[in-house]
Image (spheres, rainbow, N blue to C red):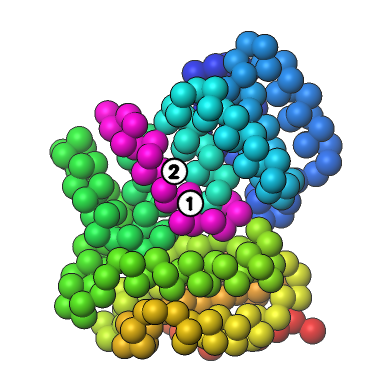
Amino acid sequence: MIPSKNTISSSIIDRMSQLSFKEGVSDFDVRLFKSEAKKILNINPVQYWIITGAIACLEKNVPDMHHAHKNAIKLSNGSSLALSNYSSSLLRIGDLGSACAYAMDAQKNDPADMRWLHYAIFDTNFFGRFKETQKLIETWDVAHKHSSHELKARVDKSVAFMDKHSIDESHLSEIISVISGILNTEIPFGWTPTTFDNSDESLFPTVFEFEIFKENADIAGLFTQIEDALTECTVPSRVRSLFVYELYSKEMSTFLDLVDDEIDKNTESISAPTSEETALIKHLIRNVKAD
């Protein structure tokens, strides 16, 4: 969530942002946030509805989430703050296409504010719209003359790969939409996309990683559904063969976290695997399903 200058609402938003969507939120926290939100209803109704939408998102109550955020947008006459917070909630429930659209609207509405540019860069990146991301990064770098954006190197590499292989942004967006559509149907609100560098130059430079938060998820079954759906989409098969994605179960993620913790504790006695070795480990165990 993106805080405003209102002290009370900023305090609530800061604490909500620290909660892990992966682990969920307790009933006590929900009641506390709702109680505190009511205090600003008459002071700042826009902030009230933004916070109410974020609370509904944490509760995984999608209809109430949409209702609250749209009220905030209407009351604020489409302010960037309301648009960007709606985008944040949409991203949390896996609706990348809509999240990207609202993030872009927020940035276009107030291009001088670097906050909205920052969120638009990351959201377009998540949705595979790398050429659009590249243009936004150029704007960012002009405003930050002494340092380039953290995503610049990988995005530039991805765009060069797309040009070389005649891959359109719409191809990537369609693939990601197919994947997210299946995941949201099978396991509502239980995944998040991340990206990391892929060292294999014969494949797309960005690997899209989806983590399933539901326990005992049928990862192999989801792979099968996704692959079947991708064969029916309009993206050329040659493009699909270059695209790389991974699915991880909650149990596998926990295991990898434990491995990372042990590595951190024993850095003097063991050597950490390289990024290539870690990627290989994840690839080899991607279909493992917990008993």
Secondary structure beneath dot 1 equals helix
* Residue type, label 2: Tyr
Compared to residue 78, the image places residue 177 above or below, namely below
Residue at 36 percent of width and 88 percent of height: 237
* Residue type, label 1: Ser
Q: Position of residue 199 (x, y in %)?
A: 31, 78
Residue identified by numbered label 1: 98
Q: CA distance from mark 2 to mark 1?
A: 6 Å
Q: Quadrant of the N terminus?
A: top right
Q: Position of residue 74 (x, y in %)?
A: 53, 27
User: What is the quadrant of residue 167 in the picture?
Assistant: bottom left
Q: Which stretch is magenta? A: 92-112
| Residue 32 lies within the magenta run | no
Secondary structure beneath dot 2 equals helix
User: What is the quadrant of residue 249 in the picture?
Assistant: bottom right
| Residue 104 lies within the magenta run | yes
Circles 2 and 1: CB atoms closer than 8 Å: yes
Pointer 2 local density, CA inside 10 Å: few below 14, some 14–19, many at least 20: many
Side (left or right) of 179 relative to 147: right
User: What secondary structure is the stretch in magenta mostly built from?
Assistant: helix
Residue identified by numbered label 2: 102
Toward the viewer: 60 or 246?
Answer: 60
Residue lying at the far top of the rendered structure: 43
Residue at 53 percent of width and 40 percent of height: 86
Pointer 1 local density, CA inside 10 Å: few below 14, some 14–19, many at least 20: some
